[in-house]
Image: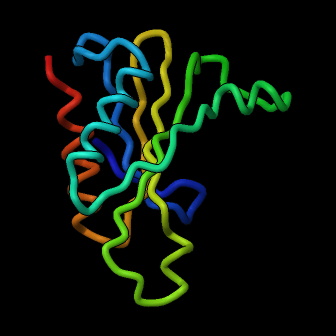
């Protein structure tokens, strides 16, 4: 998993996962996996799945031709609400894109270390082959 700054301001975690490295065969299977992990965590709440590919296609937006599917799993780790400012960085989202030979999984760094650890652990566990 690599970390980089997207557009000079967004700290992103990014893992490329070849089909040969995982038992998962679709974006939907990965979404289901994350949902189960979120539901097992007593500090996290599943919110929704967002089909970013369909949304972008339906509005006539631009999609990288290499991307065949793209969805986000949306959830929250908020264990405290110390001020209104933290609402700007919640909820969390993990994006899963599928290309011809791999999945690309991305998420923004969270301001809460326990959330980052969970998201990294869940994501790395997908490499099960």
Residue 67, image x, y percentages: 58, 21
What residue do we see at 23% from left, 29% from top? 126
Check the picture and name the quadrant holding the N terminus.
Answer: top left
What residue do we see at 72% from left, 32% from top? 55
Residue 122, quarter of picture: top left
Q: Is residue 48 above or below residue 9?
A: above
Q: How is the image coloured?
A: rainbow
The image shows a total of numbered marks equal to 0
Check the picture and name the quadrant holding the C terminus.
Answer: top left
What residue do we see at 32% from left, 45% from top? 2
Q: Is residue 99 above or below residue 56?
A: above
Farthest residue, direction bottom: 83
Residue 124, quarter of picture: top left
Q: Is residue 91 above or below residue 72?
A: below
Residue 100, image x, y percentages: 48, 10
Front-most of 99 and 117?
117
Residue 5, image x, y percentages: 47, 58
Q: Is residue 57 above or below residue 95?
A: above
Farthest residue, direction left: 129
Quick check: 4 left or right of 2? right
What residue do we see at 29% from left, 17% from top? 24
């Amino acid at each position: 998993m690599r970390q980089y700054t997207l557009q000079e301001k967004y700290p992103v975690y990014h893992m490329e996962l070849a089909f040969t490295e995982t038992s998962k065969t679709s974006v939907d299977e990965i979404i289901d996996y994350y949902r189960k992990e979120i539901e097992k965590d007593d500090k996290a709440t599943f919110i929704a799945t967002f089909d970013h590919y369909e949304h972008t296609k339906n509005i006539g937006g631009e999609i990288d031709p290499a991307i065949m599917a793209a969805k986000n799993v949306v959830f929250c780790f908020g264990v405290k609400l110390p001020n209104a400012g933290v609402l700007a960085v919640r909820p969390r989202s993990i994006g899963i894109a599928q290309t011809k030979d791999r999945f690309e999984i991305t998420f923004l760094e969270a301001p809460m270390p326990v959330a980052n650890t969970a998201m990294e652990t869940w994501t790395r566990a997908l490499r099960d082959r």
